[in-house]
Amino acid sequence: MSRSASARANRRGEPPPSPEPLPAPAVDSHTHLDIVLGERPADGEHGEWASEDAVDAEIAAAEAAGIPRLVQVGVDVASSRWSAELAARHPNVLAAVALHPNEAGDGRATDDALAEIDRLAALPRVRAVGETGLDRYRTGPEGWDAQEAAFRAHIRIAKEHGIALVIHDRDAHEEILRVLDDEGAPEHTVFHCFSGDAAFAKACVERGHVLSFAGTLTFGNAGYLREAAALTPVDQLLVETDAPFLTPVPFRGRPNASRLVPHTVRGLVEVTGTDLEELCDQLTRTAERVFGPWGSGTRA
Ligand SMILES: [Zn+2]
Ligand SMILES: [Zn+2]
């Protein structure tokens, strides 16, 4: 997500307490620490980035809850640069860089902006291009052509650099697969905040894609997501917060943070029947297969 207005709408109430720590380390495959921590400046706008101390405290709180590995996701040029810089200085963080589909639909995926994403994608701790994709909920039909062109450009950048692709799919399941099949998906393609049903999950799984589940998995009305997760091979599953959005039950509606991932991991345990510690280990293995090792300055 990208709009500060919706960030505010998702930050009602006190931050929830941290859950009981996980028995083994797991991951947050998709977070926006810049949005969690403040009114960060969007491209061409004024604002203030969170202080290094505030960012480090947030990352330390996640580690204390059993989440020592985070993927920090950019949504425009400014936040993509910030994400790359954070990953370069903090061992717990890898970065993903992109122009969000709603930015692209607004015409902001210019040649210059895409060239900057391409430059950032070459950095050693930038391990994914994303979030990119299609959003037919917030962007109207007048923006769809620009959105698809930007999505195709992002797919090419990911393949050129041999890094993962992180997909934002809002009300566009079939269209996303059409574009991916047409361009040829990168080896590691992740559907962030997976939002499809069992049939769509099957179509993604058959193609070898990875499904990352957010707090929505725990929502009472999300039986279709639990069905989707249940049929996904455990080595094609990831978990994420998409913080500050989509806070898991029992704190739905309050501000989200990486340290709350354990709620979603425990939700996945119920759905998959996997032992909790084993699931944590598997999630870490999958994350390192997709994004490369956190502990290293190189991708190999
Ligand atoms: Zn996001
Ligand atoms: Zn998204």
Image: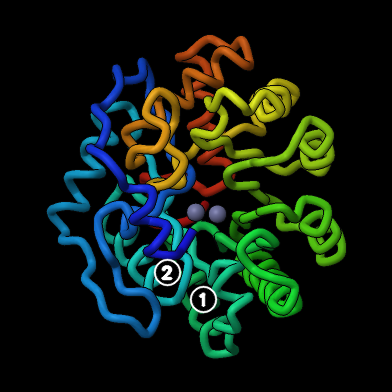
The Cα atoms of the two marked residues, 2 and 1, are separated by 7 Å
Residue 32 percent coordinates (x, y): 39, 54
Residue 299 position, x and y percent, is 50, 55
Relative side of 244 to 211, left or right: left
Q: Which residue is mark 2?
A: 80
Residue 282: where, in percent of width, then height?
54, 25
In front of the other: 251 or 299? 251
Is 193 positioned to the left or the right of 223 in the image?
left
Q: Pointer 1: residues within 10 angstroms few (<14), some, or many (20+)?
A: many
Towards the viewer: 67 or 281: 67
Q: Secondary structure at mark 2?
A: helix
Q: Residue at x 57, y 29 (%)?
A: 217
* Mark number displayed over residue 72: none
Q: Residue at x 63, y 28 (%)?
A: 222
Label 2 amino acid?
Ser
Q: Residue furthest left?
A: 53
Dots 2 and 1: beta carbons under 8 Å?
yes
Q: Can residue 156 be seen from the camera position used here?
A: no
Q: Earlier in the sequence, mark 2 or mark 1?
A: 2
Residue 291 appears in the picture as rendered? yes
Q: Write the residue at 84% across / 34% down.
A: 199
Residue bearing mark 1: 117
- Horizontal relation, residue 154 to residue 37: left or right: right
Q: Secondary structure at mark 1?
A: helix
